[in-house]
């Protein structure tokens, strides 16, 4: 009888702990920050520890990209980010052609746990030099 009572108590404790964790709102409303191309350029000119992600296709990247950018198309972010971007706290600057895919890529990075993502729109609004291959 004591064993049965002990099991019931353990079960009740387990259920209440499970219930608390299952319903817990951790308040994680993490998001990326949208910045202007000018703000992105200022970061590139004044800081050293950042990564630039070009969320376009290989063909678009070859037509012209920001120097030192890493091409990871937005549709590949989920599969490639954790291998190619191991430091989830590093500053990541994201752009694409017009800003739509960079927003999608930035949202996906945040979902994957990246904490310092800044999206700066599209290369069509980039008034600075680009590298052409």
Image (tube, rainbow, N blue to C red):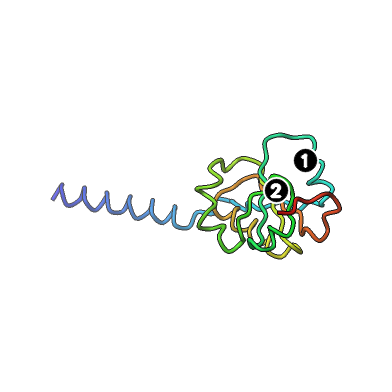
Left or right: where 7 falls relative to 28: left
Residue 25 figure quarter: bottom right
Q: Is residue 87 above or below residue 99?
A: above
- For the residue pair 27 and 44, the one nearer the viewer reads as 44
Residue at the far left in the pictured view? 1
Left or right: where 43 falls relative to 10: right
Image point 64% across, 49% down: which residue?
Answer: 70
Query: Which element type, helix, strand or loop, lies under badge 2?
Result: strand
Residue 68 location (% of width, % of height)? 69, 44
- For the residue pair 116 and 4, the one nearer the viewer reads as 116
User: How many other residues sit within 10 Å of disc 2, few (<14), some (14-19) or many (≥20)?
Assistant: many
Residue 93 location (% of width, % of height)? 70, 48
- For the residue pair 115 and 102, the one nearer the viewer reads as 102
Image point 51% across, 49% down: which residue?
Answer: 82
Query: Which element type, helix, strand or loop, lies under badge 1?
Result: helix
Residue 55 location (% of width, % of height)? 65, 58
Image point 21% across, 47% down: which residue?
Answer: 6
Image point 81% across, 61% down: which residue?
Answer: 124
3D distance between C-alphas at marks 1 and 2: 9 Å
Residue 8 location (% of width, % of height)? 24, 53
Q: Which mark is residue 93?
A: 2
Left or right: where 9 falls relative to 3: right
Q: To which residue does mark 1 refer?
A: 43
Residue 57 figure quarter: bottom right
CB contact under 8 Å: marks 1 and 2: yes
Left or right: where 59 falls relative to 99: left
Locate the C terminus and report the quarter of the image it occupies. bottom right
Pointer 1 or 2: first along the chain: 1
User: How many other residues sit within 10 Å of disc 1, few (<14), some (14-19) or many (≥20)?
Assistant: some
């Amino acid at each position: 009888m004591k064993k049965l009572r002990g099991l019931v108590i353990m079960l009740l404790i387990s259920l209440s702990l499970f219930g608390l964790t299952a319903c817990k709102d951790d308040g994680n409303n993490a998001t990326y920050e949208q910045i202007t191309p000018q703000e992105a350029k200022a970061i590139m000119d004044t800081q050293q520890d950042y990564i630039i992600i070009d969320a376009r296709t290989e063909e678009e990247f070859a037509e012209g990209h920001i120097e030192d950018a890493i091409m990871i198309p937005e549709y590949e972010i989920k599969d490639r980010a954790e291998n190619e971007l191991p430091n989830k706290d590093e500053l990541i600057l994201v752009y694409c052609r017009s800003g739509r895919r960079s927003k999608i890529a930035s949202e996906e990075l945040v979902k994957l746990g990246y904490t310092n993502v800044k999206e700066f729109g599209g290369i069509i609004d980039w008034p600075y030099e680009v590298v052409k291959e």
